[in-house]
Amino acid sequence: MAGWRSADVLANGIRVHYRRTGGDKPPLVLAHGITDSGACWEPVARALGHAYDVIMVDARGHGLTEVPRDGFTWEALGEDLAAFIRALGLDRPSLMGHSMGADTVAQVAAHYPDLVGRAVLEDPPWRDPEATPVDRQASVDRFRTSILDSQRLTREQLIARAREQSPTWPEDELGPWAESKLQVSPRVAEIAGSPREPWRVTAGQIV
């Protein structure tokens, strides 16, 4: 969108890419789901940009953010987001995350409450009972296979598949979604297999 800023910042030792609607408005940081990118939030940013300075960040290995040699863990995602907020000098922004991003937001809200004004969690990947090592490895295999399968297709083929499999998706979401599948590193599948703090412990620390 015209007027939106696209830039990189060093956070938690990696180069993190983000887009920002800008303006003298309260900051709202959006954290995307696994294999997506910050650009997938564009329809939300257009809807909320009149009221918020919307900041769409790419997680490690996603979008245009750096693919480090290690650190594809739930814990690292939380540390990345906390460092990103500090790097931009944001004053207690609102945070909203979807799926993987919701867990990331929850970690920051639980462990760095001084950095967060409010937190919105959309469909956090929390389960009862907690995933076993076998379950986590299955998730890794599933995500890696999905990433590699998608990257055998073109952007146009991915959009066509999305129209067929998810006919209710708005048209303006399809392009960014397809591009995110071509950009994401297969390394991000490792996140799904990494151990993490039990979700009830995390949620219980959010005040």
Image (cartoon, grey):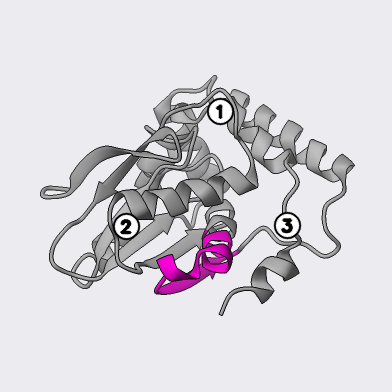
SS of the residue under disc 3? loop
SS of the residue under disc 2? helix
**Mark 1 → mark 2, Cα distance in angstroms:** 23 Å
Q: Amino acid at mark 2?
A: Pro
Q: Residue furthest top?
A: 152
Q: Position of residue 54 (x, y in %)?
A: 28, 60
Q: Amino acid at mark 3?
A: Glu
Residue 8 shows in this picture: yes
Residue picked out by circle 1: 150
Residue in the picture at 42% in, 49% down:
83
**Mark 3 → mark 2, Cα distance in angstroms:** 32 Å
The quarter of the image holding the C terminus is: bottom right
Does the CB distance between marks 3 and 2 fall below 8 Å? no
Magenta region includes residue 120: yes
Q: Is residue 127 above or below residue 153?
A: below
Total tally of numbered discs in the picture: 3
Indicate the quadrant where residue 44 lies.
bottom left
Q: Nearer the viewer, mark 3 or mark 2?
A: 3
Residues shaded magenta:
105-123
Q: Position of residue 25 (x, y in %)?
A: 18, 70
Residue in the picture at 83% in, 52% down:
131
Q: For this rendering, which residue is in front, 196 or 185?
A: 196
Residue 42 shows in this picture: no
Report crowding for label 3: few under 14, some 14 to 19, many 20 or more residues within 10 A (C-alpha): few
Q: Earlier in the sequence, mark 1 or mark 2?
A: 2
Residue picked out by circle 2: 43
Dot label at residue 104: none
